[in-house]
Image (spheres, grey):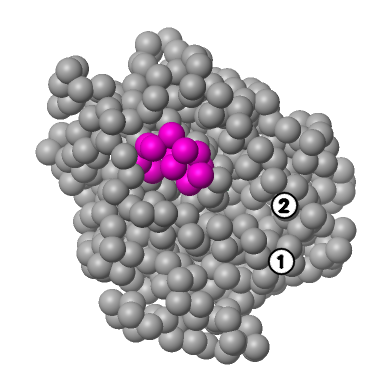
Amino acid sequence: MDTVDSESKPYFVLVPLMAQGHMIPMVDMARLLAEHGATVTFVTTPVNALRMKIIIEKIEESQLPIDFLKLEFPCEKAGLPEGCESADMLSGSDQIIKFITACAMLKDSLISCLGEKYPSPTCIIADMNQPWVGDLARELSIPRLTFNGSGVFPNLASYIIRHQNIFSDVKDDKEIVKIPGFPHRLEMTKAKSPVGVQRPGMEQFLEKRLQEERSADGVVVNSFYELEPLYVDSYTKTAGKKIWTIGPMLLCNRNTNEMSGRGNKASIDEDDCLRWLDVQKPASVVYVSFGSLAQTTLAQLAEIGLGLEASGCPFVWVIKAGDKSTDVKEWLSNGFEERINDRGLIIKGWAPQMMILSHPSIGGFLTHCGWNSILESICAGVPMITWPHFADQFLNEILIVEILKIGVKIGVEYPNQWARGEEDNNDNDVTVERDDVAKVVPEFMDGGEEMREKARELAREARKAMDEGGSSSNNLIELIKEYADTGKTSSVEP
Ligand code: UDP
């Protein structure tokens, strides 16, 4: 493996957003940097570190130079319940703002750690949603790169939408608006855009995030050039800064075994899960999961369940632990599980997603279009049925269905808010009806072979990009070399 020479000492500090979909790829990033000669400090908190216990232990055993710095998360000071240290634990706008405040409070403890126990970093890579890191990097005169867990296509569209304030005067959030300056025709409604349904009280944070995105030295993206070349080139011109595509970073894990436990401990015995998958026909099973953040109402869960039942297809269905567990358990046990019997595997809680997707019996993924899920599906050569919920997910749907042509839409027209609190909670909300699930799923599973072949081709391209000499591997080496010199400061004026 090509690494930078040991004379220069690249030392990266990684500050993820405390959310599973953001921490998982950054743990992979830490591994990739360390495997290529850099030293890494990964900033986390006690609850998040506990969730990632399995992967932290594996990394410690491997003796890679990665240190997990567990900073106390100031829940009490910010007014959050104790232990509320990850975005999936939040409910309502009020808690989101408190969570953002708590994250920003980490600045002082991180500065004092970097000044005492740790040497000065040569580069800091921070999630775009941790904009306070901009102040820290300037105080310490360290170059700063941003990362936001998403792909280049959604990053480019979001950059234009946010920095040109495209939707500021749009009153009707169902009006279709053209995104100017995009390399080809792209249109969307405000509701489906990453601006989405605005929450009050977030204005200051959003403005700070914009500023810090603009003043960052560059952007690191979990994607590969060959997947979205047009958008990589266009992003560089639009944002006027270097974009480093170094993914799919999950491929730093050499097998699905290495991947288990990346975001949490699986709530199902992995051998039991494999035994169920092993007896299914190749490419016959649809995997249904909406990631770590999206919440599903009880009424919507029932529609999905009844739709899957009527589809006649075998399925693996992940129901998150937080999705009104008692009511859901009651609904499932009220005849549904008995009727489904062995045709479906229901996982209540955290699923070993990559292990499932990589199994030859999986032929399709009904997904919320989170970027990690998309990359995982691509790497497993599995096409998708798209059911976006919020943030960049409607943009990702366009990429999958219209551009890469490795998926079909289930037909969602309106976003489903993240972190629903009492104020916007309605157990009767349904976005997709059972009949749509029952129609789209079998049609896709029976007729998806062409898309399956395209997805497999992309999987091969992804591996090539990450192999020695591939585009992502070369970018990673270049990135480390670029920030190997100690004493290099930010090249962008604040
Ligand atoms: N994930 C998992 N098991 C689950 C739910 C999620 O392993 O039960 C992982 C999934 O494989 C992915 C991440 O959590 O790596 C979710 O990230 P994504 O970007 O897809 O969506 P988000 O959760 O950020 O909305």
What label does residue 299 carry, if any?
none
Residue occupying image coordinates x 42% and y 30%: 13
Residue 375 in the image, given as x and y percentages of width and height: 39, 49
Q: Residue furthest left?
A: 469
Find residue 115 and report its horizontal and vertical position in percent.
Answer: 49, 22
Does the CB distance between marks 1 and 2 fall below 8 Å? yes
Snapshot quadrant of residue 294? bottom right
Q: Secondary structure at mark 1?
A: loop
**Relative to 358, is 44 on the left or the right?**
right
Is-magenta flag for residue 132? Answer: no
* Span shown in magenta: 133-144
Residue 369 in view of the camera: no
Query: Could you tell me the amino acid type at mark 2?
Result: Ile
Residue at screen point 45% across, 18% down: 118
Residue 138 located within the stretch drawn in magenta = yes
Label 2 secondary element: helix
> Tag on residue 199?
1
Give the position of the C terminus as an image quadrant. bottom left
Front residue of 419 and 236:
236
C-alpha separation, residue under disc 1 versus residue under disc 2 = 10 Å
The residue wearing badge 2 is 96
